Image (cartoon, helix red, strand yellow):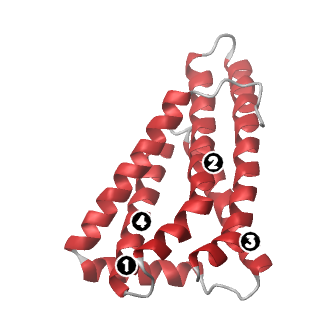
Amino acid sequence: MLKPDVEVPKRTLGYLLIVFLAASFLGYAFAIGNPDAAMEAVKRLAEQIGPISDSSFENFVKIFTNNSMVALFMLLSGLFFGLGPWLIMAFNGFVVGLVVRAVQESGELSFPQIILGLIPHGIIEIPAIALAGVSGIVWYREIVRGEGETGERFRRGAEKALKLFAVSVLLLLVAALIEAYVTPRVAGV
């Protein structure tokens, strides 16, 4: 197993995952109460993402690139008083819940297909994104609470953060491979 020589704040990672899960339920509940708004939001999201390619490799590249950019944003947002990752996880969780309910409501996929479309890659992807957020929080905490001069704390925090971020990106690579090559076959989409 990959293990950087940096302590991963497991409590922070766990809380980020709980925020994602709670926000997913809120997004799902919102979509139940506001089906038209949910459908409109999903349509806008689909327009932003663009069409799914017939090429698994093109989908892999698109997914990995997108998720890596989200992870980078998570890392950098951690420097914003350590708050950015919490907001991003909540937003992404809300969107996932919204999309699940909207797709379910559309009748295009059965509920088992939706779950099978999320679980195989999501079980790796979501913690990887959360780990990227943790990396930014670790960096921020080192700057604020670390010992030594400011420049030294900044450098040490960046080093710790980049090690965690590298693990996150490797996990996102695996998740993107699963999402592009395995998930469509498992979910039957």
Sequence-wise first label, 2 or 4: 4
In this view, the mark in front (1 or 3): 1
Give the residue type at disc 3: Phe
User: Mark 3 to mark 2: distance in Å?
Assistant: 16 Å
Give the residue type at disc 1: Gln
Up-down relation of residue 66 to residue 164 (above or below): below
Sequence-wise first label, 3 or 2: 3
Res 56 → quadrant: bottom right
The answer to whether the residue labelled 4 contacts the one labelled 3, judged by CB atoms less than 8 Å apart, is no
Q: Residue lying farthest left?
A: 33
User: Mark 2 to mark 4: distance in Å?
Assistant: 17 Å
In this view, the mark in front (4 or 3): 3
User: Mark 4 to mark 1: distance in Å?
Assistant: 14 Å
Res 103 → quadrant: bottom left
The answer to whether the residue labelled 2 contacts the one labelled 1, judged by CB atoms less than 8 Å apart, is no
Which residue has dot 1 on it? 104
Sequence-wise first label, 2 or 1: 1
Which residue has dot 2 on it? 128
Up-down relation of residue 187 to residue 96 (above or below): below
Picture residue at 58% right of the left edge, 47% below the top: 127
Res 70 → quadrant: bottom right
